[in-house]
Image (tube, rainbow, N blue to C red):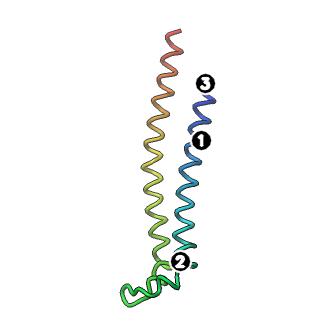
Amino acid sequence: MKDSIAARYWRTNLKIMAVLLLIWAIAGFGLGIIGAPTLNQIRLGGFPLGFWFAQQGSIIVFVLLIAVYAALMNRVDDRYHRELQEERSGEAGK
């Protein structure tokens, strides 16, 4: 049973990482490179938005995604920790 809890924990972790990495790729590559010509029509602080996003925006998105990952994994850790505790208390009662 412990292996299945560990396997589910790891699958959940991988799903979260995959989604967050996809968001980062879209933000960094999609908006910073592919979408730059469209974003450059908007100015922010005197600079084209595409330039700003390629230089600073993808880094800010990355830092925010780290915070989101930490918050999500705290929830996942709590959930699977409770499951492990329930399993251990069930085994102790046998």
Residue at image coords 57%, 66%: 25
Compute the Cα span from label 2 to label 1.
31 Å
Q: Position of residue 60 (x, y in %)?
A: 44, 69
As helix, strand or loop, the secondary structure at mark 2 comes to helix
Label 1 belongs to which residue? 10
Q: Which amino acid does label 3 sit on?
A: Met
- Say if 12 sits above or below 85 in the image: below
Residue at 47% in and 78% down = 53
- Choose the circle earlier in sequence order: 2 or 3: 3
x 42%, y 49%: residue: 71
Pointers 3 and 1 in contact (C-beta within 8 Å)? no
Tell me, for residue 44, which label it has, or none: none
Mark 2 and mark 3 in contact? Answer it, CB < 8 Å.
no
Compute the Cα span from label 3 to label 1: 14 Å
**x, y percentage for residue 24?**
53, 65
Mark seen at residue 32: 2
Tell me the residue that label 3 is attached to: 1
